Image (cartoon, rainbow, N blue to C red):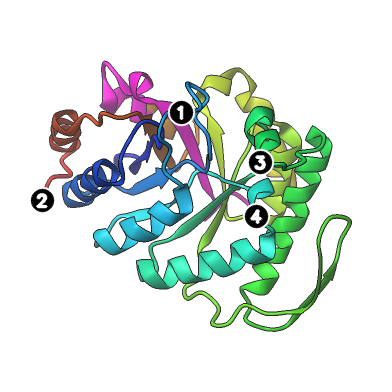
Amino acid sequence: MTLPLGFCLGTFGVSYVELRNAARLLDALGFDSVWLWDHYVSWNDPHEPVIEGLTAVAALAEATQRIRLGPLVANNLNRHPGRLAKIAATLQEIAQGRFELGIGGGGWKPEQEAFGIDQGTLDERTERVEEALQVVRLLWSGEPVTFHGRYYRLTGAIVSPPPHPLPSLIVGARGTRLCRIAGRFADGLNVQWRDRSRLDEQIAALDEGLADAGRTRHGFDLSVHADWRDLHPDPVAALDRWQALGFTRAIIYVAAPFPDNDFQRLAQMLHLTR
């Protein structure tokens, strides 16, 4: 069985119409998922147009029918996790069960500082994600939540209606500490192929976190985030290699202008086209 394949569509230098057209094509071709960044400012040029990710995910949920979608990843510093839990619940309703919540610690300092967001240290960002995962999961119960952590405090907070079905919580991580946290509190882990020299230690940390929670990798989503060029020249061989390494899904980053003809050829090669 071919590894499920999704695409992260770049949100820099692109219009919503271009994103919508690409997502609709990928949906029609039978690909697994569409993901968007969560950035406010382009690192290429601050004047370059940037589409806000979660707003666009809502629109794409309405514009598509089958494909799964979400942010890869939502920057935990950009929103209080209580607010993110509520946003995600509404996105799940719009998507009719196809939404997944990718979440990460952030870390691009110029963007955060420009908007007055204190990103803190790497350890603090990691600890924030650990608390945020717990807050989101608790709020998705639909019951009042009281949570007193180091970074977040809730008293009788509620998300109503809760999302149904519960979205998958996917952690985007590079460091081993966050990989272990994903194993303890999330449904999936997304790691970058450019960090493949660290893959063994990332997987070991994930397995430790899963063991801490009394779980195994059975049913856990371990996805690889790679670039378009990493899929070529032989996409089937690349997917087979990632599957042999234990990945359950591949997500390929693609920048605008999106390669519609290549998407179509790839779907035919993978026998996805209906």
Residue annotated with mark 1? 47
- As helix, strand or loop, the secondary structure at mark 2 comes to loop
- As helix, strand or loop, the secondary structure at mark 3 comes to loop
Q: In this view, does 67 lie above or below 194?
A: below
Q: What is the CA distance from the residue labelled 1 to the residue labelled 3? A: 15 Å
Residues in magenta? 213-240
Between 29 and 121, the one lying in front of the other is 121
Amino acid found under the numbered disc labelled 4: Arg
Q: What is the CA distance from the residue labelled 4 to the residue labelled 1? A: 23 Å
**Foreground label between 1 and 2:** 1
Q: Do the residues labelled 4 and 1 touch (CB within 8 Å)?
A: no
**Foreground label between 3 and 4:** 3
In the displayed orientation, state which residue is furthest to the front: 47
Residue 44 relative to residue 196: left or right: left
Q: How crowded is mark 2: few (under 14 residues within 10 Å), some or many (20 or more)?
A: few
Amino acid found under the numbered disc labelled 3: Phe
- As helix, strand or loop, the secondary structure at mark 4 comes to loop
Q: Of marks 2 and 4, which one's residue comes earlier in the chain?
A: 4
Residue 15 appears in which quarter of the rendering?
top left
Q: Residues within 10 Å of mark 1 (few under 14, many from 20)?
A: few
Identity of the residue drawn at 39% across and 68% down: 97
Q: How crowded is mark 4: few (under 14 residues within 10 Å), some or many (20 or more)?
A: few
Question: Which mark, by number, is residue 79?
Answer: 4
Q: Is residue 175 magenta?
A: no
Q: Of marks 4 and 1, which one's residue comes earlier in the chain?
A: 1
Residue annotated with mark 3? 115
